[in-house]
Image (cartoon, rainbow, N blue to C red):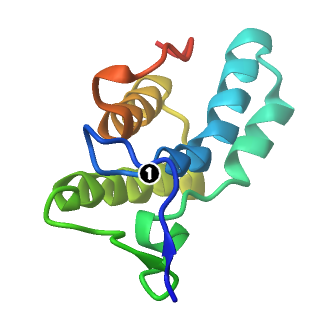
Amino acid sequence: MLKELSQVVKETGVSGDYLNEYHGLVMLFRMYKRTGDIDILEDIFSNTIKKYAERYPESMYENVITPFNKGRIKRLDEIADALNVFITKRDLDGEIFTGLIREAYILVKGDSMPRLGLW
């Protein structure tokens, strides 16, 4: 029997739990901006963002990708790929990096996106 996705945002059809893929990066980036501590960059560069279906395999969860959310999921996967390229190359362009994370939050939460202090 397949599990039901938790925290699905009605407006977007995407699980709000997926944002946990980004929370660690958000916290580390905020600390880095505040302190300038180079060691924090090492922590940032040791992260990997999973694509949506990697976090929620369709073999385990029902209604992971639906006609309603598939456009958002496709873009979230593109964002995960882009962030992982930055991480792999150890290249942190703060403006692009935070822009991608902000877009991911909007794709998941829609209009109910919280302020994260990144932008």
Residue at 57%, 42% in the rendered image: 22
Who is closer to the viewer here, 76 or 86? 76
Q: Is residue 11 left or right of residue 49?
A: left
Q: Is residue 114 left or right of residue 13?
A: right
Who is closer to the viewer here, 84 or 5? 5
Residue at 47%, 56% in the rendered image: 85
Residue 49 lies, with reference to residue 34, above or below; the image says: below
* Rendering quarter of residue 10: top left
Locate residue 65, reporting x and y percent: 28, 69
Residue 93 lies, with reference to residue 87, above or below; the image says: above
Locate residue 25, reporting x and y percent: 64, 38
| Dot 1 amino acid type | Ser
Residue 51 lies, with reference to residue 75, above or below; the image says: below
Q: Which residue is mark 1?
A: 15
Residue 19 lies, with reference to residue 93, above or below; the image says: below
Locate residue 49, reporting x and y percent: 55, 57
Residue at 29%, 58% in the rendered image: 73
